[in-house]
Image (spheres, rainbow, N blue to C red):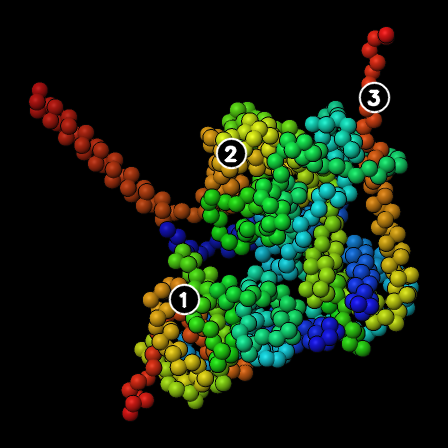
């Protein structure tokens, strides 16, 4: 039960001023700019965009600054901003096969066409803190060499040549749906959920939650025998049909991370032994999230592939209902709001139960004494 | 019609002041729905291509967007109207009335109410809002309205509705909370007959 | 037949201009447009306004579409005094860029200054974008692994 209580206005106003003061910190230091955040904390900005489900780097950077670096608060701010905007329409599906890739690695084929392109990775760094970064030392430009222009063949296509992997769309390719079956931001969730809706939920899901779930499948809670078939990071073109023009135009490019997980599959009564696939696609550069998403996507297909659902990562309702960190933080943090009346009622109830308990004990000991 | 003419038609005749006019139209619709049968002005400056009327156009531009499929009945449909809706609000035009969130029709060519989306028992809001262009909102046969938002009874006299309108409404009442909300428009005036309003003929007066 | 061909050629030309404008930063477009001299008067028909486009991906990269997430987009539509309409759509929140892009698209469609726009705006911006792509590709190529096999033992 909620009751209106007045009287906090001055305290709230001053709390907001105190927040602004602490956010700014030491005034003798320059204020950090949004451009600096976009350029130098790019992966934080990417995470906010991915989990806010809104691609807008400058706004995400502003949200990070306003939230003092609290990622979930920043995600919340960007989600709130998003609700103020009209939706113009939907893009054509982005073609990740035509990505201008900065990175593409495969753990399944050493010599695949296009090669292993490491890109700007933390892998192979020594994870030693670098004192040079305390200052502002000049950094040389990234080295370059002539690109052989070899197309980056998809690992799934290589396996498909031997028919050893499932196709992305199981049915007749001419009947592949042209539109998603729904949109989480428009209709309430219903279970069971189609895979396209699950992927939408996972793409905006909390990185930490998906990471933990993906990890749990590796540790035996619903094993899926995964290989990182392919991971690519780079820019894809966003094209949209403009009805007033009658043709599609490009809106520019966005950076995404894609992970194709290749999973061993022994087959079932209906399906031959073959590799199955888990898929991850995330705004920005976030290999960890894309890999975790692909693991969880594959786990959630347990029912479809005739596997027993025994582990949390295979439980669609559990995973999807708890993946959204804005929802989760809202419900956890609401506990700090005034529950004075609720609590008074509880207090009253406990007092009464206690009185009854004590009365019962007294009467029991009286009976006992009388018996003796 | 040539492409160029079509594209000029499509981009003209929208709101002069999109934010405030859309808010004004929304407010009028809300008030009209809260007080079924009362007359309201749509404070808008739209000029949609023929045959869509200005009131229907104002409601379309305020309420429709890419998430609201629109169905156009005979007398509200033309190539120009489709291009205009597409540019002004991005709303897709659908062929099946029961797939529409908004339907725009003329009173003389009204579809059967149960041919529209009626919503589901769990989500009665997933229904069509039917916008009907009538000849006039006054001067027609008397209809008696009862229900939420009406103190007792209210009499309205829209002109040009089909004769079985009241009968269709009472038939669909049995489906409540499913049903269709109706807005009657003439020029830039309108009234609302939400699904909660019971509509009946004023038999006694007509007999007497 | 010839008319349809001409139309698709015009569409392809306009698309190429709009694609390059969308991909280019506002200040670069403004710098190129300055070379055209005074721009014609234009009436705003819609926007510039910021909104969302739902970006879609494909399940498995090549399967059925799914909603990946939204992107902030700015669009504008303008009309020149002669009646020609121009549209602009681009990622981001740059209203001035959208407005200017729509004016340039309208001027291109109008035809009188098409050659100027292609030479002064389209060509330099397209070259700059191509340079950027080629630089990313060359930087990525420098991180490509050249595997070599250690020879173990002799025959």
Q: Position of residue B152 (x, y in %)?
A: 31, 78
Q: In which quarter of the image is residue C115?
A: bottom right
Judging by the rendered image, the residue that carries numbered circle 3 is C148
Judging by the rendered image, the residue that carries numbered circle 1 is B179
Q: Position of residue B153 (x, y in %)?
A: 33, 79
Instruction: Chain letter for mark 3, please.
Output: C
Q: Is mark 2 on a helix, strand or loop?
A: loop
- Camera-near label (3 vs 2) is 2
Furthest-left residue in view? A371
Judged left or right of residue C73, residue B131 is: left
Instruction: State whether residue B23 appears in this view.
Output: no
Residue at the spot 60% in from the left edge and 45% down from the top edge: A172
Residue at the spot 43% in from the left edge and 89% down from the top edge: B139
**Residues packed near mark 1 inside 10 Å, few (<14), some (14 to 19) or many (20 plus):** many
Q: What element carries label 3?
A: loop
Judged left or right of residue A70, residue A152 is: right
């Amino acid at each position: 039960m909620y009751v209106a209580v007045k009287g906090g206005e001055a305290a709230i106003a001053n709390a907001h001023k105190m927040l602004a003061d602490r956010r700014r910190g030491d005034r003798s230091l320059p204020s950090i700019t949004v451009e600096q955040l976009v350029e130098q904390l790019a992966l934080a900005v990417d995470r906010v965009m991915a989990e806010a489900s809104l691609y807008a780097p400058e706004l995400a950077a502003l949200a990070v600054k306003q939230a003092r670096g609290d990622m979930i608060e920043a995600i919340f701010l960007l989600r709130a901003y998003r609700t103020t905007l009209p939706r113009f329409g939907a893009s054509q599906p982005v073609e990740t096969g035509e990505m201008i890739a900065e990175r593409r690695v495969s753990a399944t084929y050493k010599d695949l066409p296009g090669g292993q392109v490491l890109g700007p990775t933390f892998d192979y760094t020594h994870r030693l803190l670098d004192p040079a970064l305390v200052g502002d030392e000049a950094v040389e430009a990234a080295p370059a060499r002539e690109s052989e222009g070899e197309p980056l063949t998809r690992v799934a296509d290589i396996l498909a040549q031997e028919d050893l992997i499932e196709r992305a769309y199981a049915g007749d390719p001419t009947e592949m749906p042209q539109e998603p079956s729904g949109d989480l931001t428009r209709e309430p969730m219903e279970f069971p959920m189609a895979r396209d809706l699950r992927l939408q939920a996972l793409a905006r899901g909390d990185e930490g939650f998906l990471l933990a779930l993906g990890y749990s499948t590796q540790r035996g809670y619903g094993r899926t025998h995964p290989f990182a078939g392919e991971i690519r990071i780079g820019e894809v073109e966003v094209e949209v049909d403009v009805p007033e023009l009658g043709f599609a135009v490009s809106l520019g490019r966005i950076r995404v991370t894609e992970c194709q997980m290749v999973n061993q599959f022994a087959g079932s009564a209906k399906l031959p032994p073959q590799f199955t696939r888990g898929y991850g696609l995330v705004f920005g550069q976030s290999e960890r999230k894309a890999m975790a998403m692909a693991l969880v996507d594959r786990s959630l297909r347990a029912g479809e592939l005739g596997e027993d659902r025994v582990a949390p990562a295979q439980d669609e309702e559990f995973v999807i209902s708890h993946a959204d960190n804005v929802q989760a933080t809202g419900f956890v943090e609401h506990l700090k709001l005034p529950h004075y009346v609720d609590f008074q009622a509880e207090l009253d109830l406990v007092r009464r139960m206690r009185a009854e308990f004590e009365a019962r004990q007294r009467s029991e000991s009286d009976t006992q004494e009388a018996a003796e | 019609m040539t492409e160029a003419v079509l594209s000029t038609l499509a981009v003209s005749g929208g709101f002069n002041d999109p934010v405030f006019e859309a808010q004004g139209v929304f407010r009028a619709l809300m008030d009209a729905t809260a007080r079924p049968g009362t007359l309201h002005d749509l404070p808008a400056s739209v000029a949609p291509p023929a045959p869509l009327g200005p009131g229907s156009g104002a409601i379309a531009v305020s309420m429709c967007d890419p998430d609201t499929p629109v169905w156009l009945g005979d007398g509200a449909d033309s190539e120009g109207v489709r291009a205009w809706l597409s540019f002004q609000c991005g709303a897709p035009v659908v062929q099946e009335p029961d797939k529409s969130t908004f339907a725009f029709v003329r009173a003389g060519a009204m579809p059967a109410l149960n041919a529209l989306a009626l919503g589901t028992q769990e989500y009665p809001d997933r229904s069509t809002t039917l916008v009907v262009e009538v000849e006039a909102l006054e001067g027609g046969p008397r209809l008696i309205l009862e229900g939420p938002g009406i103190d007792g009874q209210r009499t309205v006299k829209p002109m040009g509705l089909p004769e079985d309108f009241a009968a269709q409404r009472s038939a669909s009442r049995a489906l409540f909370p499913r049903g269709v909300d109706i807005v009657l428009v003439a020029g830039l005036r309108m009234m609302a007959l939400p699904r909660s309003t019971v509509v009946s003929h004023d038999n006694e007066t007509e007999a007497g | 037949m010839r008319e349809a061909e001409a139309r698709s050629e015009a569409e392809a030309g306009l698309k190429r201009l709009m694609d390059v404008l969308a991909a280019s930063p506002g200040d670069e477009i403004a710098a190129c447009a300055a070379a055209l001299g005074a721009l014609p008067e234009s009436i705003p028909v819609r926007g510039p306004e910021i909104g969302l486009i739902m970006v879609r991906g494909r399940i498995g990269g090549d399967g059925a579409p799914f909603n990946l997430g939204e992107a902030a987009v700015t669009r504008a539509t303008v009309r020149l005094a002669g009646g020609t309409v121009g549209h602009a759509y681009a990622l981001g929140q740059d209203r001035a860029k959208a407005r200017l892009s729509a004016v340039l698209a309208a001027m291109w469609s109008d035809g009188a200054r098409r050659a100027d726009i292609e030479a002064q705006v389209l060509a330099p911006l397209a070259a700059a974008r191509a340079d950027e792509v080629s630089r990313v590709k060359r930087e990525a190529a420098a991180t490509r692994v050249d595997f070599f096999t250690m020879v173990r033992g002799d025959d």
